[in-house]
Amino acid sequence: MKRRTFLAGSSVLTIATLALPQYPVRAGEPFTDAQSAALLRMVKDIFPHDALSDEPYQAVVGQLTGAAADPNMLAMLRDGLTALDAAAEGAWIDRGEADRITALKTVESTPFFITVRVTSLFGLYGNPAIWPAFGYEGASYEQGGYLFRGFDDLDWLPEPLS
């Protein structure tokens, strides 16, 4: 692969990723309430954070719902949820956490899981509104860099041993 091809592909992927949050949440479409609840549970199981409310996770489900406007994406997401139920030998969402994680591991190499994981990754950690919950103060460039702005103010890490 040529460098130019790689850079062009990376740019397209970045633009597509940044466009994901623009999808509106359409209640009840195209997923049933049970499917939406399963997607929410899946996102929370993949990226568990006690400090977060359901709102950022719901935003990711909204992104997936918007992306499901594409019939191929909708079919993949629905089939993936069916595969999760099959792996759990019943309703995946009704299983305990350990059983849900085991079922997720059986589908982790599928396009369904990868799509949900990548959408969740960018949807959660790219959301500046929730950065304070993680102790991230944002980019330092706009504020003069870290050198003169507290490069050592990591209050979420233990003090180093002397």
Image (cartoon, rainbow, N blue to C red):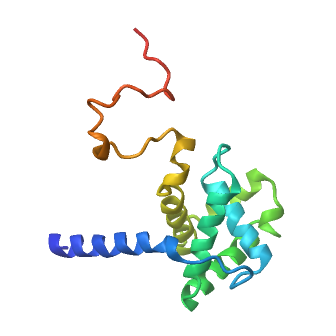
Taking depth in this image into account, of 26 and 64 the one nearest to the observer is 26
Q: Tell me residue 47's x, y (percent).
A: 60, 53
In this rendering, position of residue 2 left or right of residue 143: left
* Residue displayed at 44% across by 41% down: 137
Can residue 110 be seen here?
A: yes
* Residue lying furthest front: 143
Observer-nearest residue: 144 or 67?
Answer: 144
Q: Residue placed at 76% from the left, 56% from the top? A: 99
Give the vertical position of 39 relative to 141 (above or below).
below
Q: Quadrant of residue 146?
A: top left
Extreme residue in the bottom direction = 71
Residue 46: image quadrant is bottom right
Q: Is residue 2 visible?
A: no
Reply above or below: 139 against 36: above
Task: Name the quarter where the C terminus is drawn.
Answer: top left
Left or right: 10, with 67 as reference point? left
Q: Residue furthest top?
A: 162
Q: How many marks?
A: 0
Residue 156 appears at what percent x and percent y?
A: 51, 29
Left or right of 67 on screen, residue 94: right
Residue 31 percent location from the top left of the image: 71, 81
Image point 51% across, 47% down: which residue? 131
Q: Quadrant of the N terminus?
A: bottom left
Residue at 77% across / 80% down in the picture? 32
